[in-house]
Amino acid sequence: MNIDRTNSAKYRASLAAVTGMDIYSASVMEAGGLIWAMGSKDFEKFLLISTTCGCGCGLLPDFEGSGVCGEGMAVKVCALTHDNAVALRKALPFTAPQLVGLSRSVGCGDRLGVATPGHIRAARGSGFVPILAQQSIREMERTGRTPENVIDDATWGIMQEGYTDGYGSDADHLKQPEYIDSCLAAGFTLFTVDPGDHVDNAAHGYDDAELEARFVKLPFADLGITADAMKAAYEGKEFDLGQSVLSFDHHSLLKAAVKYSGAVLHTVGMYRHLVEAAAGRPYELEVSVDETETPTTALEHIFIASELKRLGVEWVSLAPRFVGRFEKGVDYIGDLSEFEARFAEHAAIAKLLGGYKISLHSGSDKFSIYPIVARYTGKLVHLKTAGTSYLEAVRVVAACDPALFREIFAFAYDRYETDKATYHVSAYMERVPDISGMDDKDLPGLLDHFDVRQMLHVTFGSVLTTVKPEGGLLFRDRFMDVLRRNEELHYETLAAHMKHHLELFG
Ligand SMILES: [Zn+2]
């Protein structure tokens, strides 16, 4: 689709005059014989579709809106509804998520639904394709969002920022087939399958007799192979990773098979469901085993990838569980040389077994490992982030509404012990500073404090959804209002933080 911005400044002025709105300058463009823009009035945003000829009242019947005329233009003013988002994705295909394939990519989870312009500013010119609509069902439930909300919010952000280079979407950590259906219907394109519940985490502790007993009981019929054929396929076979050559012995095969065969089968089932349900719609797959109790060894990675390939699964990225700690909102915790040695193996395996991307989950703020990751993956990498963008929004609240920040801070302090349950974090509330005597101007700096970051990170769901005893949301509306009123600061704060991530990849 041909996009023309030659007359954008002129149209921007005319649209502002006709509608009385502030027009987002990056959004103004001509495409398909019409002029498109996003505007806002009293902090409410609208899509504007206009033409310089005729009365324009029949302008694009797919869009719901009202017409205004003036300055030689007819303008249709459209609210940011789901139906209008659907119509926009049809009319301007760059506003719809697309396949990212093996391009280097960054996942930009946006739990508040207003971060996309900041994410785009970070991704522009970085060599990373941004995945702007990314949320797991678990996080959607925590924030009261739906798959449609997630895609629509990205669509509006794309339009506002006038970003035409294409973006991806990620239905993250899918554990059940029905969620594939709802995310497909909403327009998601990347499906991250998480078979973690089907990993036998106890396999490391089994002795040889136990492993043997469990191995022979694996569902070989479903796996489409016999026990003997599986042994023959792996035992003694060498995998040349360049810097090292790995091979399975009897014990390591049994352990890998016992630990991961259930996960392989679950992934195959999810993949087949996806292929069938997609019915012509674009899709691609990520396999994530990052949420297991023990790190994925090189041999286990080889086993998982080889089995998935044998069973016909195709994927663009795979997320192993790495050595060390990938805690929320903070840098990598662990031995960097150990990480490098193990990461080099994972990257080499990904290249050897088909050339897919290594995906880094809980990837935000892991600044010390990015240069290592870049060195071994080249471009075959996906960096997945989410909560760190929420923390940057909190930083904006700290700067712009200190009183609200202090309330959220106290609330999060009390919620931490409860909310941390499902997260990898190690903050101690005893180390969180007492901020009662702290100057307002020092509050944003708290967002650089290890324990404060984790405290605020894991409590986001409670902060966003807690209802007051008398009804109404405790924080959410005021929180969102601060971001609306300080929109540019929010985008620039976010962009600077995300750019810092991407630049370390070189
Ligand atoms: Zn993950």
Image (tube, helix red, strand yellow):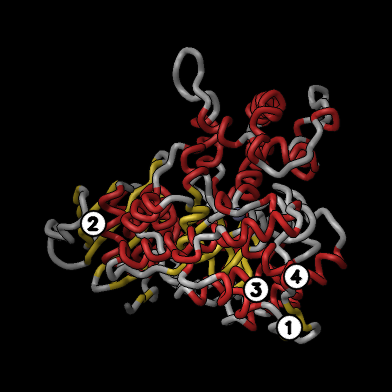
Is label 4 in contact with label 2 (beta carbons under 8 Å)? no
Q: Secondary structure at mark 2?
A: strand
Q: Which residue is mark 4?
A: 343
User: Residue at point 68% right, 56% down?
Assistant: 364
| Between marks 1 and 3 in the image, the one whose residue lies nearer the viewer | 3
Q: Residue 263: x percent and y percent?
A: 55, 58
User: Residue at point 62% right, 56% down?
Assistant: 214
Q: Amino acid at mark 3?
A: Ile
Which residue is more in the foreground, 156 or 206?
Answer: 206
Bin the neighbour count of mark 3 within 10 Å (Cα to Cα): few under 14, some 14-19, many 20 and up. many
Quadrant for ligand 1?
A: bottom right
Q: Is mark 1 within 8 Å of ligand 1?
A: no
In space, the residues marked 4 and 2 are separated at their CA atoms by 54 Å
Q: Which residue is mark 1?
A: 241
In space, the residues marked 4 and 1 are separated at their CA atoms by 12 Å
Q: Secondary structure at mark 3?
A: helix
- Image vertical order of residue 420 relative to residue 415, above or below: below
In space, the residues marked 2 and 3 are separated at their CA atoms by 58 Å
Q: Which residue is mark 3?
A: 302
Tally the marks. 4
Q: Which residue is mark 2?
A: 75
First-in-chain label (1 vs 2):
2
Q: Amino acid at mark 2?
A: Val
